[in-house]
Amino acid sequence: MRVLVIGGGAREHAICRAVYESGAELYAFMKNANPGIKRLAKDYFLHDETDAEKVLEYALKKKIDLAIIGPEAPEEAGVANLLAKHDIKVASPTKEAAEIETNKEFMRHLMEKYNIKGSVKCKAFSSVEMAKEFIEMLDGEVAIKPLGLTGGKGVRVAGDHFNTIEEAVEYAKEVIEKGIGKHHKVLIEEKVVGEEFTLQAFCDGSTIYPMPAVQDHKRLLPGDKGPNTGGMGSYSHKSGLLPFMTADDYEEAATILQKIIEALRKEKREYKGVIYGQFMLTTDGVRVIEINARFGDPEAMNVLPLLTTNFVDICMSMIEGTLSRKKISFARKSTVCKYVVPNGYGIKPKAGEEIRVDEEAIKREGGLLFYASVNEKDGKIYTTTSRSLAVVGIADEIEDAENICEKCLKHVSGNIFIRHDIGKKELIEKRIKHMEMLRG
Ligand code: AMP
Ligand code: GLY
């Protein structure tokens, strides 16, 4: 089986590793030469991942049987549609199905139309005046979002990123006028309060198979301060739940994903591939923050290494619509993933700096290393402006997984930044207390 993975980040490195371990022959199409993927792949091609024609050309040349798309941008560009048209199997959604991520207004409308529980009060505007009225109606307790893709960095939330109605309106105006996220429109949502978690699921168009829940850390700085980033690190617990959530919360989130899949099917946008729900656990249940049409980054690195079922077989099941008959299992282990980013990341990142990585030592400590956006030159690794690499520790308890992760990180040095508080007891206890306080 010849499998093509599109994308070159740490998430894709984790996907490539799972494909490789499934016994398939791996091919990669990425814009940056990911040093980890390069080594696993039989062959790779460096080019813009949203160039669907080029992806097709490469896939045909390499006689690819199955393609998996990592990031959302190539999905939006219709890469899955074009490959499928040429009889290449694709374990990722079409452009139409991926609109669940690429157009936030579409996602909210779909949930409303099909009466799916868990949405928030929200409205999209192209007029600053009308946006202002809505912000005022919600007393400034809002989240302001560009409609399209911004790599998780375009969202601003009351209390976190601005404090007054004037500041809120100012940012809404900026989103509309600059066309951030490509649409000249802004989505204003009611701000919801609680603890966030991610639930990813395999999906074959009608059935979902949910994976262990993960908690990501979007904020740049320790203690959840600073701007939103693509994600600084994440953890999961061996139970499949998180320390602050119940089995009912998990079920509620899984039901929302299942209903979204059913709604997409009714809209003739059949969804095949991994679906990702970002949820807020609130005092009145689980609320949807966003839906993504792919694995999460970093969350893929928490769940894929635990998969004990052949990943390529699962991909085939998603495509064939036979997921309900498939037995899927994950090792009952806890995981902690921390990203290494260039100093200044999220504000003014230092690109082109050397990072020293002792891969052998990381292996000896029992951790996993996933490369993200770095350049390799003469055997040396250099930063770009994006996240550089991630390290994952796996053990029975979160505490031990965190320890392994930290031991491994000692073997990475340079002008780098790491959120060391991720997965630490202190932060996890803060989350448990926060939820207890909210729930009374
Ligand atoms: P998103 O890119 O939509 O995931 O948003 C980035 C981050 O902003 C989320 O991870 C949340 O922490 C926060 N956020 C987004 N929407 C809301 C909301 N409606 N209420 C509170 N926080 C939000
Ligand atoms: N971890 C956030 C995302 O993948 O969108």
Image (cartoon, rainbow, N blue to C red):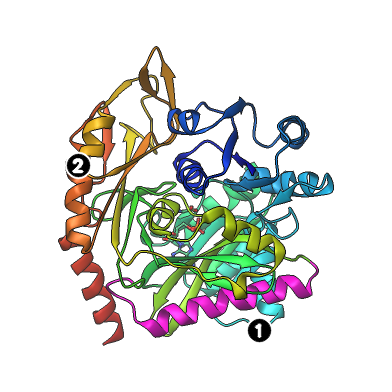
**Picture coordinates of residue 223 (x, y %)?**
24, 55
Q: Secondary structure at mark 1?
A: loop
Q: Which tag is nearer the camera, tag 2 or tag 1?
A: 2
Q: Nearer the viewer, residue 177 or 183?
A: 183
Looking at the image, the residue that sits furthest to the bottom is 440
Residue placed most toward the observer, 200 or 345 = 200
Work out whether residue 62 can be spotted: yes
Image location of residue 409, percent across then percent down: 22, 38
Q: In the displayed structure, does residue 258 sit left or right of residue 409?
A: right
Badge 1: few (under 14), some or many (20 or more) residues near its Cα, within 10 Å? few
Quarter of image, res 385: top left
- The residue at 57%/82% (across/down) is 117
Amino acid carrying label 2: it is: Glu
Report the predominant secondary structure element of the magenta stretch.
Answer: helix
- Quarter of the image where the C terminus is located: bottom left
Q: Residues within 10 Å of mark 2 (few under 14, many from 20)?
A: some
Reading the image, the residue beneath label 1 is: 115
Q: Which residues are magenta?
A: 242-268
